Amino acid sequence: MFPVVVVHGGSDMVPKERSENSKLGVCSAARAGYAILRAGGSSMDAVVEAVSQLENNPYFNAGCGSVLNIRGEVEMDAIVMDGKTLGSGAVSAVRNIANPIQLARLVMDKTSHVCLTAKGANQFARSMGVAEVPPESLITEYARMRWTKNLAPGTDTGESQMGKMGTVGAVAVDSEGNVACATSTGGLVNKMEGRVGDTSCIGSGGYADNQVGAVSTTGHGEAIMKVTLARLILFHMEQGQSVEAASDLGLAYMESRVGGLGGVVTVDPQGHWAARFSSSQMAWAAAQKDTLHYGLLTGEEFTQSIDDRL
Ligand code: ASP
């Protein structure tokens, strides 16, 4: 079994001028996660590191760079899950935390709960010594521009949602065969205040079980929740499907049953991996056997040595 980490940067219609930075971002996050695995670290450490990097990268809809709700504010959701214990931690609707994924991990490690929300999550963060940052520091000019554009009368909000998402996530298997997942998002553009999507919902935004595998999802959260996409894909794997076929079956069901598009990264405990999407694009990268694989468009896959730079 060869350790692997697979990262996504959201099932998004990435504007041309941002596509290079999206690819660079997922590749460098996959490298960071892989460095941990290569040094014998755990899959949980690898996915949290990869996702923290993407949260810090303003080109993605998580942490700094999150999209804004209808009031022009950031509200973020995140989840982690450990396939060995089925332990999971999540936060939803948090506002002034730079790395919600690290807070989600603390919920898993330090509380008896699975998800903390809004004010309570912030209180918990304070009690753990997690720094709160000024909310404006998470807002990019690009996010504000999209928010303003979507406030214009006559904007087709359905259309603007489907094309402009960018949640981040990662799955990994370590040298001991433990799987883990992590997913983090700012949610949907101009969402209602208090809207919580799939990302922080166990089985929807992610799921990890050493007996089957791990999945991190992205896409239209309301659709993902209706079909519990991450768990649905693992169900297909339990039925004997490969990581790739199970991912495609889950995505196809979501599209035919509720009209939702999205993308996933999936691993099994043997180190097989897949990055699949029904949306038109998803920035993704995988690192295994000292090789980096990455792509953005359907059917696209570039390969290079892990030590070469793009
Ligand atoms: N799934 C996220 C949400 O609905 C959005 C995304 O994946 O970009 O909150």
Image (spheres, helix red, strand yellow):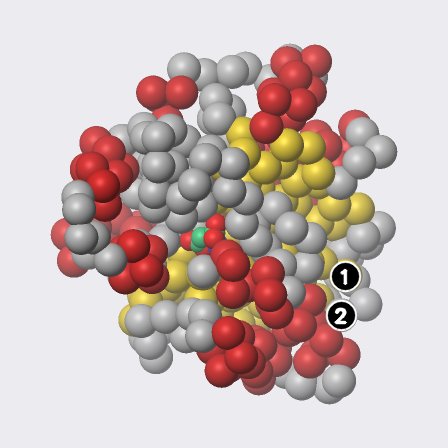
> What SS does tag 1 mark?
strand
- Residue 105 seen from this side: no
Q: Nearer the viewer, residue 70 or 62?
A: 70
Please say if 308 is above or below 233: above
Crowd class of label 1 (few under 14; some 14 to 19; many from 20; radius 10 Å): many
The residue wearing badge 2 is: 212
Do the CB atoms of the residues marked 1 and 2 lie less than 8 Å apart? yes
The residue wearing badge 1 is: 209
Residue furthest front as drawn = 153
Q: Going 44% across and 45% down the picture, which residue do you hit? A: 187
Question: How many badges with numbers are in the image?
Answer: 2
| Image position of 16 (left or right of 195) | left
Where in the figure is residue 10, as x and y percent of width and height?
41, 56
| Image position of 139 (left or right of 43) | left
Q: Going 61% across and 22% down the picture, which residue do you hit? A: 119
Amino acid on which disc 1 is placed: Asp
> What SS does tag 2 mark?
loop
The CA span between labels 1 and 2 is: 6 Å
Where in the figure is residue 248, as x and y percent of width and height?
52, 80
Amino acid on which disc 2 is placed: Val
Where in the figure is residue 242, as x and y percent of width and height?
63, 83
